[in-house]
Image (spheres, coloured by chain):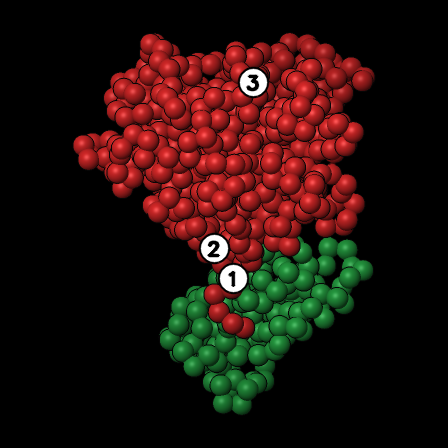
Chain colours: A green, B red
């Protein structure tokens, strides 16, 4: 875990930026993994923005997280085009394989499962994202194979 | 300002440019329902109840925030408007628990009122509970998020009126909720317990921690000698709880009502307000003479004390060491009073009736036990006293009149003005002037420190020494003065700060609703009460003079310091639960 003093450096880097909070939170989350209470308290002290306001921003955007997340983030699309192409079955299989519900993190800390809105890849629906990588034309079996690869090799081919 | 004309429901009216549709409708005698709108706060257009239809406009507009334009044709009653309002309200009601008979705001709830106004008789939407848990962490304030309607008034009040920002809007979409950061108890935030959020909450999502049961138990216990002190500001407001117009004075009826409730003695916080002036006045003179920390800051308002402890701990040496009048009273009730009347102090149960929620926190402070006991055992807000009176059928406006009891019920006009912003300053100056100059003050009403502006300044000539004073009400305004002290640009000698807008008359324990107009009427009633007093300077209070002679000795003397003065604690704003 990084040193909280790093937060002061990050904040100082945005001194001349207008409305810098989102940039600061993005950098801080990258550094610390998630926006914990001690971390955001330090952001509040360094920026002199009330903690309630910072916490509001951190909980508004789904890409910010105040709780620790798994090593890999799995985001399953829950919009209509994926749904009609079988995303429900894919999701059920993933939940069964990871033994968690959406919004939860596996016990070994390797995966967090989330929903995402449309990724703009409806042509290859159903889709999911694992970390920064997108995977399309999924079947329940294919999805599990991808996650198994992540677990064993730390990555997977599309 | 330029005038424009608009037509509302066929009625043509002329209004100044910049008038909102809501205000224009009011002028045309048309009532538009509102929920999130509050006259003290800028509109946020969150509840969508005030929507109106404007000819040529594709969308419905919120009357609270939409400005009139010349020639605008507004409908406040079209089918679209009616349906839209009704659905907005049904959706709000579908997330409200509807346990009205168990709610502290039963009968004074704006959601109830507006449901009545719109003729709601059923709701097609299924009830869905709101996120958030009942928060009982504070000595002063209870938060029940299940009743929240997301109007955001509390958030605005905490941020804009008080510059505290203890709570905010968290999450988004359907699951948005009002909360503290990380869902901590409100007691673990820099909340100052002022209760201004309670005064502006339209429903029962925020209310005071009740001491009603505690007080009834003491009143029912024949072993207990139960005394009550009443703050200056409660006497100009309690009548509102009984349906009278704001500003109606019912002091003597209130005293009679309290006696009917069963209090053994009904005393007046005004007595210790006079005492505060003597102690604080001498402390100021001492600091001026001996080069003590200046400017000296007043210490009567417990919300303000919480604020400086959290946000400006480095300035604590500026704060007068005097306890507030409530706490001075508590200490004397269990020492001087008990001794004088041969009552065992352990049997004295000391209650205070306050316009304030922070007074509950103050009474709970562990250091407030100079008498050997907790100085104040229970604190009732103006609202809670009204509840107790109604429980036993007291109709305040029709009560007979009774007087306060001796000796802790004797006071002067200088004490009653403590209830108004500027009042402590004025009372102090009335006394300090005469003590220093040994001449009577020509004009006792020091109007320079009166008024409703956030910050006011005055300069008083004390036998050649110019004393520069400032007054702030509302913590947002207080912060402006404190920033100046930190920056070294404040050349004041004495600053009065009250946490609430208008001072104690606008306190978080006062009848709901509140507005600038209501506060102004209570303020005027306080000055009316002052003018009715024969004695209007604290140092002329004969009971206070006797107290020094019989018991305390000298102002700021050893005994006074032991019982009537206190110390403060620097607090952090947030204490994170775990290390990173």
| Residue reaching furthest to the bottom | A153
Within 10 Å of disc 2 (Cα), the crowding (few <14, some 14-19, many 20+) is some
Give the alpha-carbon distance from disc 2 to disc 3, as whole Å. 42 Å
Label disc, if present, on residue B575 of the rendered structure = 1
The reply to whether residue B20 is visible in this rendering is no
Label disc, if present, on residue B188 of the rendered structure = 2
**In the rendering, at what x and y percent does residue A48 appear?**
67, 56
Q: Which of B421 and A139 is in front in this view?
A: B421
| Residue reaching furthest to the left | B222
Question: Image point 49% across, 86% down: which residue?
Answer: A151
- Do the residues under discs 2 and 1 have CB atoms within 8 angstroms? yes
Question: Image point 68% across, 15% down: which residue?
Answer: B443
For the residues beneath circles 3 and 1, the answer to whether they share a chain is yes
Give the alpha-carbon distance from disc 2 to disc 1, as whole Å. 7 Å
Instruction: Please identify, in this view, whether the residue under mark 2 or under mark 3 is nearer the observer.
Output: 3
Q: What element carries label 2?
A: helix
**In the rendering, at what x and y percent does residue B557 appear?**
52, 41
Image quadrant containing the C terminus of chain A: bottom right
Q: Is residue B459 above or below residue A94?
A: above
Q: Mark 1 lies on which chain?
A: B
Q: What element carries label 1?
A: loop
Q: Nearer the viewer, residue B505 or B567?
A: B567
Q: Is mark 3 on a helix, strand or loop?
A: loop
**In the rendering, at what x and y percent does residue B161 appear?**
61, 37
Label disc, if present, on residue A135 of the rendered structure = none
Q: According to the image, label 3 marks what residue?
A: B536
């Amino acid at each position: 875990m990084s040193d909280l003093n790093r937060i002061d450096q990050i904040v100082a880097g945005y001194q001349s930026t207008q409305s810098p909070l989102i940039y600061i939170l993005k950098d801080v989350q990258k550094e610390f993994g998630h926006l914990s209470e001690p971390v955001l308290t330090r952001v509040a002290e360094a920026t002199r923005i009330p903690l309630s306001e910072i916490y509001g921003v951190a909980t508004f955007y789904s890409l910010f997280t105040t709780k620790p997340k798994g090593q890999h983030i799995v985001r399953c699309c829950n919009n209509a085009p994926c749904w009609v192409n079988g995303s429900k079955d894919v999701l059920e299989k993933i939940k069964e394989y990871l033994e968690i519900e959406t919004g939860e993190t596996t016990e070994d800390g390797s995966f967090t499962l989330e929903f995402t809105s449309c990724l703009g890849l409806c042509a290859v629906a159903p889709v999911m994202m694992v970390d920064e990588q997108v995977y399309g034309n999924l079947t329940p079996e294919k999805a599990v194979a991808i996650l198994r690869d992540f677990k064993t090799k730390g990555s997977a081919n599309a | 300002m330029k005038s424009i004309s608009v037509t509302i429901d066929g009625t043509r009216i002329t209004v100044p440019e910049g008038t909102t549709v809501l205000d224009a409708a009011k002028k045309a005698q048309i009532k538009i329902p509102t929920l999130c709108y509050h006259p003290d706060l800028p509109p946020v257009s969150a509840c969508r109840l005030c929507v109106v239809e404007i000819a040529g406009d594709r969308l419905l507009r919120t009357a609270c925030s939409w400005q009139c334009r010349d020639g605008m044709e507004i409908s406040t009653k079209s089918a679209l408007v009616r349906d839209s309002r009704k659905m907005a309200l049904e959706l709000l009601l579908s997330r409200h628990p509807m346990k009205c008979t168990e709610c502290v705001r039963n009968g004074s709830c704006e959601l109830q009122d507006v449901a009545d106004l719109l003729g709601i008789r059923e709701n097609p939407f299924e009830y869905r509970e709101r996120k958030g848990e009942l928060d009982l962490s504070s000595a002063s304030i209870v938060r029940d998020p299940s009743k929240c309607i997301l109007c955001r008034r509390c958030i605005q009040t905490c941020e804009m009126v008080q510059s505290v920002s203890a709570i905010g809007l968290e999450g988004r979409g359907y699951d948005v909720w009002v909360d503290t950061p990380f869902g901590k108890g409100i007691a673990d935030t820099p909340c100052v317990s002022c209760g201004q959020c309670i005064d502006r909450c339209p429903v029962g999502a925020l209310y005071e921690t009740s001491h009603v049961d505690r007080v009834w138990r003491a009143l029912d216990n024949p072993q207990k000698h139960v005394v009550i002190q009443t703050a200056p500001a409660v006497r100009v407001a309690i009548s509102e709880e009984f349906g009278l117009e704001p500003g109606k004075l019912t002091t003597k009826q209130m005293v009679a009502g309290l006696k009917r409730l069963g209090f053994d003695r009904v005393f007046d916080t005004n007595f210790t307000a006079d005492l505060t002036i003597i102690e604080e006045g001498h402390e100021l003179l001492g600091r001026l003479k001996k080069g003590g920390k200046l400017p000296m800051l007043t210490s009567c308002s417990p919300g303000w004390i919480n604020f400086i402890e959290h946000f400006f701990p480095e300035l604590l040496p500026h704060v007068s060491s005097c306890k507030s009048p409530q706490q001075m009273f508590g200490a004397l009730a269990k020492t001087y009073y008990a001794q004088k009347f041969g009552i065992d102090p352990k049997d004295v149960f000391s209650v205070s009736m306050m316009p304030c929620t922070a007074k509950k926190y103050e009474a709970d402070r562990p250091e407030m036990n100079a008498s050997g006991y907790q100085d104040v055992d229970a604190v009732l807000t103006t609202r809670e006293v009204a509840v107790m009176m109604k429980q036993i059928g007291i109709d305040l406006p029709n009560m007979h009149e009774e007087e306060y009891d001796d000796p802790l019920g004797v006071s002067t006009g200088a004490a009653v003005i403590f209830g108004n912003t500027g009042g402590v300053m004025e009372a102090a100056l009335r006394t300090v002037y005469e003590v220093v100059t040994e001449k009577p003050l020509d004009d006792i009403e020091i109007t320079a420190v009166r008024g409703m502006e956030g910050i006011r300044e005055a300069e008083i000539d004390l036998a050649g020494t110019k004393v520069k004073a400032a007054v702030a009400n509302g913590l947002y305004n207080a912060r402006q003065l404190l920033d100046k002290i930190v920056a070294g640009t404040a050349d004041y000698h004495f600053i009065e700060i009250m946490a609430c807008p208008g001072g104690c008359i606008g306190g978080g324990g006062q009848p709901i609703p509140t507005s600038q107009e209501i506060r102004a009427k209570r303020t005027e009633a306080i000055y009316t009460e002052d003018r009715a007093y024969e004695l209007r300077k604290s140092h002329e209070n004969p009971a206070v003079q006797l107290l020094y002679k019989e018991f305390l000795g000298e102002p700021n003397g050893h005994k006074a310091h032991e019982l009537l003065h206190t110390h403060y604690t620097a607090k952090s704003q947030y204490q994170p639960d775990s290390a990173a």
